[in-house]
Amino acid sequence: MYSKELTKGTLKPIILKLLSDNENMYGYEITQKVKELTQGKIDISEGALYPILHKLEHDGVLETEKVFIGKRVRKYYKVTKPGKEVVIEKTNEVNNFIETLSLIFNPKSLAK
């Protein structure tokens, strides 16, 4: 598993990418999907997830829908139309950052 220190800056783009690739998702589902896709290497805690979701909702990037399941309420998150531009921007930023890190950590592989 990667350290929280290493993954902290990529949590927002990871969450946005997952939500843009799926119709909508609820919090626990997001954490489990990240764990599954990364084979357990990235583990998003609820303490890290929900502040990001709430901020994105406040900024109009995400919208929510409450669904009643028995006596429980499940809050689903979905990317808004304006939020789709943010997803593209954050995805491009992360991809560019990965390329930049490769200049430092894998300089020979880029010289080919």
Image (cartoon, helix red, strand yellow):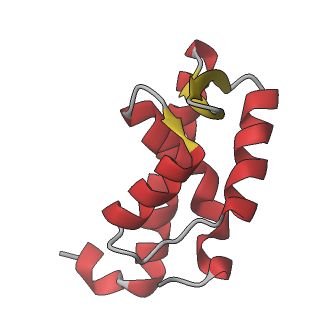
Decide: is 33 above or below 39.
above
Decide: is 95 above or below 87.
below
20 with respect to 79 (left or right): left
Q: Where does the image place residue 84, in percent across and percent down from the top left? A: 53, 24
Pick the residue in front: 111 or 70: 70
Residue extending furthest left?
A: 112
Q: Residue at x 47, y 84 (%)?
A: 1
Q: Residue at x 43, y 76 (%)?
A: 103
Residue 85, quarter of picture: top right
Task: Quadrant for the C terminus, please.
Answer: bottom left
Q: Where does the image place residue 111, in percent across and percent down from the top left? A: 25, 76
Decide: is 67 above or below 81.
below
Residue 40, quarter of picture: bottom left
| Count of residue discs | 0
Residue 10, quarter of picture: bottom right
Pick the residue in front: 94 or 18: 18
Decide: is 101 above or below 14.
below
Answer whether residue 93 is visible to the viewer in this image.
Answer: no
Q: Residue at x 58, y 23 (%)?
A: 67
Q: Where does the image place residue 23, in percent across and percent down from the top left? A: 41, 25
88 with respect to 82 (left or right): left
Answer whether residue 21 is visible to the viewer in this image.
Answer: yes
84 with respect to 59 (left or right): left
Q: Residue at x 58, y 65 (%)?
A: 44
Residue extending furthest front?
A: 71
